Image (cartoon, rainbow, N blue to C red):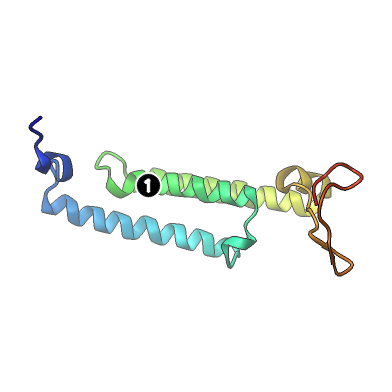
């Protein structure tokens, strides 16, 4: 089984496109950091499931333009703007409606109440 290792690892990569990959990656990574910074979160522990989905969507939108010659950066910027506009709209409505917030974020589960650990199943059949 004779495989061409150069084709597997390098393919048709040339120096010019390798430099373009570096520039594309710096641009897209900077955009992801900027968007996450604008979201106001300081750490991963502060992220809700909804915000993790936003991060995955941003990563997906940023990934293709980093290494694909056929994918320009501008469509990804449009995706970023759309994702952030959706994020802002949903967080606005979540602030206005507790019911909407519970649908998007889920209801909080308390681990400590009145200074004591709350373990097991509560009377309302939710885990605590």
Could you say which is closer to the camera, residue 114 or residue 71? 114
Q: Is residue 117 above or below residue 55?
A: below
User: Residue at (50%, 45%) from the top-left corner?
Assistant: 57
Secondary element under disc 1, as helix, strand or loop, is helix
Residue at the extreme bottom = 115
* Residue 13 vertical position relative to residue 116 in the rendered view, above or below: above
- Seen at 65% across and 53% down, the residue is 48
Q: Mark 1 points at which residue?
A: 63
How far from the left and from the top, in percent, is residue 2?
7, 32
Residue closer to the observer: 53 or 119: 119
Furthest residue toward top: 1
Dot 1 alpha-carbon crowd within 10 angstroms: few under 14, some 14 to 19, many 20 or more: some
Name the side, left or right, on which 20 lies relative to 43.
Answer: left
Residue 42 % position (x, y): 58, 68
Residue 37, position in %: x, y?
53, 65
Q: Is residue 37 left or right of 71 when viewed as pictured?
A: right
- Number of labelled discs? 1
Residue at the limit of the structure toward the front, as seen here: 120
Q: Which of 8 and 38 is in front in this view?
A: 8
What residue sits 19% from the left and 57% below the top?
19
* Image quadrant occupied by the N terminus: top left
Q: Where is residue 65 in the image (x, y as percent from the top left)?
A: 33, 46
Direction from residue 97 to residue 56 in the image, left or right: left
């Amino acid at each position: 089984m004779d495989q061409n290792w150069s084709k597997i690892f390098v393919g048709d990569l040339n120096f010019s496109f390798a430099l373009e990959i570096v520039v594309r990656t710096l641009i897209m990574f900077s955009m992801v950091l900027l968007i996450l910074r604008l979201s106001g979160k300081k750490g991963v522990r502060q992220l809700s499931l909804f915000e993790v989905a936003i991060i995955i969507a941003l990563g997906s939108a940023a990934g293709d333009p980093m290494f694909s010659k056929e994918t320009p950066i501008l469509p990804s910027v449009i995706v970023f703007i759309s994702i952030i506009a959706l994020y802002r709209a949903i967080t606005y409505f979540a602030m206005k409606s507790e019911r909407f917030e519970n649908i998007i974020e889920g209801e909080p589960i308390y681990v400590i109440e009145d200074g004591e650990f709350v373990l097991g199943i509560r009377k309302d059949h939710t885990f605590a």
